Image (cartoon, rainbow, N blue to C red):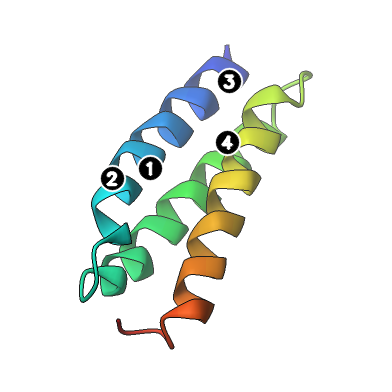
């Protein structure tokens, strides 16, 4: 059940991340990455790794986007 909850959190974070590919909206990843990491923490309490791994991938995408944009752009 916690893996499903983590997957839902990861999907929500991924949907919120879609507009951040537009220039000057990359700062929103500062809010989205912690949400994805929260999903990874929830998923770590599950016996399945699917939700946790998905949230870690979403967080990694957000961190890469922050790195490319210099943390702001």
* Between marks 3 and 2 in the image, the one whose residue lies nearer the viewer: 2
* Cα–Cα gap, marks 1 and 3: 16 Å
Q: Name the residue under label 1.
A: 13
Residue at x-position 29% and y-position 59%: 20
Residue at x-position 24% and y-position 72%: 23
**Crowd around label 2: few <14 · some 14–19 · many ≥20 (10 Å):** some
* Between marks 2 and 4 in the image, the one whose residue lies nearer the viewer: 2
Q: Which residue lies furthest to the top in this view?
A: 1
**Crowd around label 4: few <14 · some 14–19 · many ≥20 (10 Å):** many
Q: Which residue lies furthest to the bottom in this view?
A: 70
Left or right of 20? Residue 64 is: right
- Percent position of residue 42, x then y: 57, 36
Left or right of 5? Residue 19 is: left
As displayed, is residue 12 above or below residue 72?
A: above
**The C terminus, quarter of image:** bottom left
As displayed, is residue 53 above or below residue 36?
A: above
Q: Name the residue under label 3.
A: 2
Q: Mark 2 points at which residue?
A: 16
């Amino acid at each position: 059940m916690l893996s499903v909850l983590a997957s839902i959190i990861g999907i929500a974070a991924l949907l919120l991340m879609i507009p951040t590919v537009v220039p000057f909206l990359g700062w929103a990843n500062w809010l989205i990455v912690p949400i994805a990491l929260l999903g990874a923490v929830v998923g770590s309490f599950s016996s399945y790794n699917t939700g946790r791994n998905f949230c870690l991938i979403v967080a990694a995408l957000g961190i890469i986007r922050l790195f490319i944009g210099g943390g702001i752009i």
